[in-house]
Image (cartoon, rainbow, N blue to C red):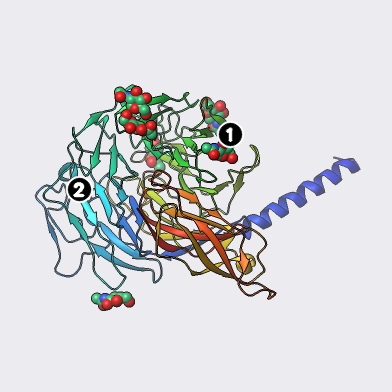
Amino acid sequence: MFLSSRSWVLLIFINIITITSNFYRIHGELPGKWELLVAHAGIASMHTAVTRYGTVVLLDRTNIGPSRRMLRKGHCRDNPYDRVLKHDCYAHSVLFDPSTNEIRPLMIQTDTWCSSGQFLPDGTLLQTGGDRDGFKKIRKFIPCERNESCDWEELQDSKLISGRWYSTNQILPDGSVIIVGGLHANNIEFYPPREPGILSLQFLTDVQDGQWDNLYPYVHLLPNGNLFIFANNRAIQYNYTNNSVVRDYPSLEGNPRNYPSAGSSVMLALQGNYTSAVIVVCGGAEYGAFKRKRNDTAANGSCGRIVATDPNPVWEMEDMPFGRTMGDMVMLPTGDVLIINGAQSGSQGFDQGTNPCLNPVLYRPSEPVGLRFMTLNPATVPRMYHSTANLLPDGRILVAGSNPHYYYEYGGDFPTELRLEAFSPEYLSDDRANLRPVIEELPEKLRYGQAFEILISVTLPVVGIVEVNIGNAPFATHSYSQGQRLVKLGVTSAVPESGGAVGGRYRIRCTAPPNSKVAPPGYYMFFAVNQGVPSVARWVQLIY
Ligand SMILES: *[C@@H]1O[C@H](CO)[C@@H](O)[C@H](O)[C@H]1NC(C)=O
Ligand SMILES: *[C@@H]1O[C@H](CO)[C@@H](O)[C@H](O)[C@H]1NC(C)=O
Ligand SMILES: *[C@@H]1O[C@H](CO)[C@@H](O)[C@H](O)[C@H]1NC(C)=O
Ligand SMILES: *[C@@H]1O[C@H](CO)[C@@H](O)[C@H](O)[C@H]1NC(C)=O
Ligand SMILES: *[C@@H]1O[C@H](CO)[C@@H](O)[C@H](O)[C@H]1NC(C)=O
Ligand SMILES: *[C@@H]1O[C@H](CO)[C@@H](O)[C@H](O)[C@H]1NC(C)=O
């Protein structure tokens, strides 16, 4: 067989492309870096939350039998309602310290399976509901210094009015928490409770289909004080004060997006005069994949994006580079969104996912449609059902969990995953270290609307604006980070502290969020972001 010279050129060209792309694959040169933090966390984290001390609460469910970590010596849980171990000396929750990679077992009494949570204004983690004896439980974890021994506390004198399984919690402007929906609970209630107890939410019933698809609804507190509630493929704007649907949004085309069809959702960073809020919903399983137990049905890769505060908004559609169900969407300090974890086939549920989606992708909201997605360095560990992703104060993303099985199983295609990893976005790469700001001085507490100054230092000279962005710590579970929020503060240009020197120290004047609808009270990770490179965050408490 003879090839024309043009074909040879083509063939050589194709070879070069293949060699080049193999080089990048072998050398892992897609952006971002993976690192193993802990080989044996002892539990698979179904729910994960970062405390204001930078420690991380990992939480599984209790009716699961032996984990791989014992409670402290002499500590066991005696619970006649436990399905597997009525006398249980294994940990089902642990506290992870990313500064030392140490793990400390925590004692959780009642079942937290498919429960929900949110941080309160004083930094306490409120944790609600679950299965069986946990159905109506309210728990608190008051975080502490790394050298102290805080633990879970289960409230004895108050409980939920409706049992809650697969609900979503969102902190409100007054510092209370709304608890939305759940299996056979198409209603809302509040913590602390409010009259008249529970309020029925017809919307959740309307969108329920033959496999639910209305569980773990996406709830975003809009800066006008109403809630944006998304379930299945529809959304409403809801005034929880008078229990009225203020607006119906157009349906999002395509597959359902909530449990068990898990896509994920974020509200993009609030900024400017804070009048506008943009919601993004991405991915999910095709309808029926769950019901018919088809773990080979390809997941959808479409994202919808809507300006929820516009008078006549429409969904703008865009395809991700991969179909993905059970992905997590993490708000980065820059305002970009990391989409990570999940599967390319199947749905949520035990043994219902295959074909892990190992490549994270970066979503850059300010780019035009078509240029927003960037494919990142793939993981080696599949993270599917019951896995989580959380932003750490140092800018890394903690990735935990994945247990597609009813109990802990360490064999087979997708074993129970006990490893903790961190993904470092490209902004942490060595070649950008010279741009990385360090926060030298800032107030510990901020009042709404307060004008204040911070002092930063950077190696290379700063030109113009260094962003100052505050992000809260959400409660991540089932591919959705409850309460996740990033707010960009109003800032002036960075002014050199001592003129002339290369790099050095800069003062920035900032204005705290105007009110608690824009940013509910509580602890936030406070980042300075220089040319897309975030500082290590300092925790700041936003108070009235
Ligand atoms: C823990 O560390 C903090 C801060 O370093 C210190 O103030 C406190 O006394 C320590 N507590 C204990 C129990 O050692
Ligand atoms: C919600 O309804 C209450 C009572 O009617 C009203 O006072 C409040 O302003 C409404 N909230 C919004 C955000 O419109
Ligand atoms: C609730 O408040 C909104 C204003 O946000 C108002 O438009 C609506 O009519 C009120 N609904 C009820 C049932 O009072
Ligand atoms: C996802 O669903 C949408 C809407 O049905 C469809 O247009 C699109 O082709 C699907 N995209 C992917 C990547 O699966
Ligand atoms: C807020 O900013 C937007 C966009 O910059 C502008 O169109 C709008 O008029 C502003 N609204 C108020 C109330 O200032
Ligand atoms: C996918 O489903 C098939 C058919 O039910 C089953 O045999 C297989 O074990 C499942 N795979 C996984 C990874 O759960």
Q: Name the N-terminal-most of marks 2 and 1.
A: 2
* Residue drawn at 51 percent across, 46 percent down: 269
Residue 31 visible, this orientation: yes
Quick one: 106 or 267, which is closer to the camera? 267
297 sits to left or right of 534: left
Residue drawn at the location 24% of the way across and 30% of the way down: 199
| Mark in front: 2 vs 1 | 2
Q: CA distance from mark 2 to mark 1?
A: 40 Å
How many discs appear?
Answer: 2
Figure check: 341 above or below 26 = above
Determine which quarter of the picture holds residue 195: top left
**Element type at mark 1:** strand
The amino acid pointed to by label 2 is: Ile
Please state the horizontal and vertical placement of residue 399, each as a whole percent of the image.
43, 55
Neighbours of disc 2 within 10 Å: few (<14), some (14-19), many (20+): many
Residue sticking out furthest to the right: 5
**Location of mark 2 (residue):** 138
Q: Which mark is residue 535?
A: none
Mark 1 = which residue? 318
The one nearer the camera, 388 or 51, is 51
Q: Quadrant of the N terminus?
A: top right
Q: Quadrant of ligand 5?
A: top right
Please identify the residue farthest to the left as the structure is shown. 80
Residue under the point 86% across and 46% down: 9
Label 2 residue SS: strand
Q: Is residue 12 placed above or below 536 in the rendered structure?
A: above
